[in-house]
Amino acid sequence: MFSENYSRQTALASLKDLDADLSDRDLVTYAKSEEAMVRAAVAERPSTPLTTLLKLARDESPTVRAGVAKNRRPEMPEQVYQDLAGDKVVEVVLALIANPQVPDALIAKLGRQFHKEYSGAARERLSSKSGAAGLLGRVGIAR
């Protein structure tokens, strides 16, 4: 009756709906999608309810966790950022480093890690800033 790709096609078509103004109920529903790309799109939206974001931050898919890391929600609890900073998937940590909402202190801590994949990106973010954070990045203290 339905093609094998029915569920995938429906979920991917739903991504287009995420551009519209969605209610909290709609976002919660999309956050439960079987498609990681749909959950990731919900995770990136600052208007997604906080309880939903907290669940998505522990999602099995690194793409979804990276979506939460990219989320620019102003009142995101710092503990969420700290948990994501410890993620074993580089994509998630790089998304966190690229998010301007993440505090410089956490970025500096990532810059001191031994992970070549993201410590350089953290130092670069700090060195591009002015003030104390920029100085730390330029003199290599955040290495």
Image (tube, grey):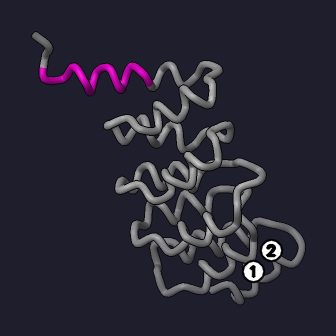
Nearer to us in this view, 52 or 91: 52
Q: Predominant secondary structure in magenta?
A: helix
Q: Amino acid at mark 1?
A: Arg
Name the outermost residue toward the right: 131
Which image quarter holds the C terminus? bottom right
Q: Secondary structure beneath disc 2?
A: helix
Q: Is residue 111 left or right of residue 10?
A: right
Q: Are marks 1 and 2 in contact (CB under 8 Å)?
A: yes
Residue 82: x and y in percent read 61, 72
Q: Residue at x 51, y 66 (%)?
A: 93
Name the outermost residue toward the top: 1
Asked if the magenta segment contains residue 12, the reply would be yes
Asked if the magenta segment contains residue 10, the reply would be yes
Badge 1, how many Cα within 10 Å: few under 14, some, many 20+? some
Q: Which mark is residue 134?
A: 2
Q: Which residue is mark 1?
A: 138
Range of residues picked out in magenta = 4-14
Using the image, determine if residue 45 lies above or below residue 95. above
Occupied quadrant, residue 25: top right
Nearer to us in this view, 93 or 57: 57
Say how many tags the image has.
2
Name the outermost residue toward the left: 1
Q: Residue at x 60, y 78 (%)?
A: 110
Residue 13: x and y in percent read 38, 19
Using the image, determine if residue 110 lies above or below residue 6. below
Q: Residue at x 63, y 25 (%)?
A: 23
Q: Amino acid at mark 2?
A: Gly
Residue 33: x and y in percent read 37, 35
Q: Residue at x 55, y 52 (%)?
A: 68
Residue 70: x and y in percent read 59, 51
